[in-house]
Image: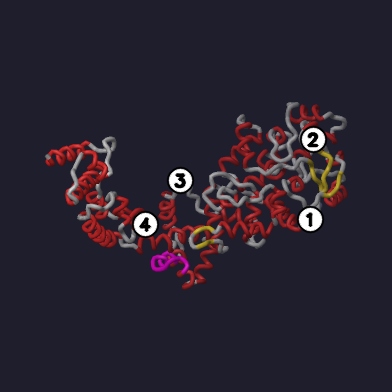
Amino acid sequence: MLGFPAPYSEELLYSTIARAGVHDGDTSPKQLLDKVFNNRGVIATVDLPSHVGKLASQYSDSLGLDARTLISRHTLWPIYAPFLPQERNNKLREWMSGSSQGAAHLASGIAASRVEAKAKLFVCVECLNEQKSKYGECFWNRTWQIPLLKVCPAHGLLNITSIELDGEHRHSHIPVEAAEILEPVKGEAVDRAFSNQAAQLLKVQNEGVSFSQWTSFYKHFASKLGYLHGRRIDHTRIHETVIQFWGKRWLSGAGVLPSGTETSWLRGLFRKHRKSFSFAEHIVVISALSNGAISVCDAIEKASRMVNCSKKCSHAKLQESTTEIQLGQDQIHWKQLLELSPPKAARQQKPALYTRLYRNHYDWLIYINSVNHADNKTVNKRVDWAQRDRQIARDLRRANESLSDDLNAPHLSRTFLIHQLDHRATVEKNLHRLPRCSTLLALYSESTAEYQARRLTRAHLSMKELGQEVKRWSLLREAGLSDERMTDIVAELLKEILSEQT
Ligand SMILES: [Zn+2]
């Protein structure tokens, strides 16, 4: 198409196509699609349009408007990209450029991480006035169409327009001049905070952050801001803080009110990430927990500097040894300190060193501290398992001695024997670390046959003591045995006992 307009700063591609139609005179929407894309079936998409490659081919190379640039500067891709792994961003971009056939498959993957798009197009009336005086025409700014965004960062509340995105307008790119501007949206005080954060995302140049990086980020984030209960994440307090900062009504209106259950998205965010979370969920948590002190853009930057241990953490060791070669003086000093003290104590001893490392080697510091965390060390250091094994084995031997002579003792199963010990929980959980105990348990515990034989002997002795006549049926009743449950060995024993009677 001849003389296709270049997009204005922050203009949506949707809008540029609409202006092309206006510039071209009396073109119908279908004719416009034909001229631009050679395809009348293209759907007019605001947030993540496809066929961007075709648009890019309208421009001469000197303008530098290739598909990649158009996608990052003139669509809503930047509000999703930092929250998706890089591979998915690459695929998404391929699809948006129009070079991928897997559109449906991909679109479904994206939909999961995307909050509901606005049903109508929005405008800021003051921005429109500024555009008119500056350019002589108006365009759809991408900031206005960010889902859930109600406030123009430069001005005030946005207005809804008459342009609905689905239905009859599916194939039409409608210029802003053709829209009827309706009432302003209703917003709350927190809407400004949310809108400012969301609008900032458009400035971020990020190609994707992996699940493991986001997982580490939130672990450190919660720990740094004190949202831990002992060593665990304090989910209850996080939940309360989020509700208090945004208010239930706002969260519910935005569709991100976390439930109080184990499976709520809010809890999921602080666990190992297996799926992506939406930009709105990230903003909600980062703003609330830091009380507005940390922006979502800072968070993205920190997360993307986290050590990426995608192939389990066996690679972490490797990473440590490879970085070893280039360690600076401060880093070497810190590593030496960590050999003597846990990170917290090391930090108290050398606060200036810690600050320098925090500033210059943030990801290395977080990584090396997590490897040398006090919790990791005490688990291995505090318990001397060999010593504990010997001590528990002694207790076990003593317990067995008093039980084995007692014909009335209950079934001496493995579990029963363990329950006679003072540290039964330790033994149950750590039997693999206690070889002596393990062997003794195998030796002392009774099989079903052994237990039945003991019951039979006990019953026989007591009946004889009382001078009772020993009949087969009365002996079985006294021993609590039945023919169905009796093992073969015990049946033999019973025969022997009865034959001795006669
Ligand atoms: Zn504005």
Residue 252 magenta-drawn?
A: no
Local secondary structure at mark 2: loop
Local secondary structure at mark 3: loop
- Inter-mark Cα distance, 4 to 1: 61 Å
* Circle 4 Cα neighbour tier, 10 Å, few/some/many (<14 / 14–19 / ≥20): few
Local secondary structure at mark 4: helix
Q: Is residue 501 left or right of residue 279?
A: left
Closer to the camera, 258 or 315?
A: 258
For disc 1, the marked residue is 154
Q: Is residue 95 left or right of residue 271?
A: right
* Circle 1 Cα neighbour tier, 10 Å, few/some/many (<14 / 14–19 / ≥20): few
Tell me the quarter of the picture where residue 49 sits. top right
Q: Residue at x 59, y 49 (%)?
A: 264
Mark 4 residue type: Ala
Tell me the quarter of the picture where residue 97 sits. top right
- Inter-mark Cα distance, 2 to 3: 45 Å
Residue farthest to the bottom?
A: 349
- Looking at mark 1, is its residue's CB closer than 8 Å to ligand 1? yes
Taking 370 as reference, is 144 above or below it? above
